[in-house]
Amino acid sequence: MSISGVVRLGKPSKKAIFSMTDSAIKRVKEIMNDKKIDNCIGLRLGIKERGCSGMSYTLDFATQKNKFDETVVADKDINIIVDSKALLSVIGTEMDYIEEPIKKEFIFINPNATNTCGCGESFTTKDFSIPDLKLPKKN
């Protein structure tokens, strides 16, 4: 099962790899209690190429941690396992959950996002690639 949400540009209040608001923690706990996934060690946060702006979040139940993944404790009952390929794109992101009369959704407030599509489901981030270094030639 995947959990989806929308992206909002902005600066979250906490300086952590990834954080969650109280409403997001409450909703994730409800989902985890309903689903009862065997051997679940937390939620895996990743990104994939998709949508108008280029990338979207993936959030799935995790049953294992890969070697270079980062574990963030969002609450005593919730571990967020950040996929190593997503780490630079999500540092500082805060996950929120809102309930409005016409929609209920998770929102990702990402300080690295430079653009989002009209519906908010995909985003673009700053370029984190390392430029080619031109080193002097040895004689």
Image: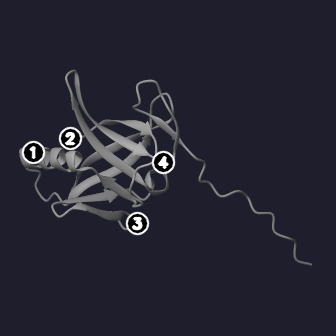
Identify residue for label 3: 68
Per the image, label 3 sits on a secondary structure element best described as: loop
- Three-letter amino acid code at the position of disc 3: Phe
Q: Tell me residue 41's x, y (percent).
A: 19, 61
Per the image, label 2 sits on a secondary structure element best described as: loop
- Three-letter amino acid code at the position of disc 2: Met
Please report contact status of discs 1 and 4: CB closer than 8 Å, yes or no: no
Q: Tell me what residue is drawn at x 50 percent, y 35 percent.
A: 54
Nearest the eye: 21 or 47: 21
Identify residue for label 2: 1
Distance Cα–Cα, label 1 vs label 2: 9 Å
Q: Earlier in the sequence, mark 2 or mark 3?
A: 2
Q: Tell me residue 106's x, y (percent).
A: 28, 38
- Three-letter amino acid code at the position of disc 1: Lys
Q: Tell me what residue is drawn at x 76 percent, y 63 percent.
A: 133
Q: Nearer the viewer, mark 3 or mark 4?
A: 4
Q: Which mark is residue 35?
A: 1
Distance Cα–Cα, label 3 vs label 4: 23 Å
Per the image, label 1 sits on a secondary structure element best described as: helix
In the picture, the quarter occupied by the C terminus is bottom right
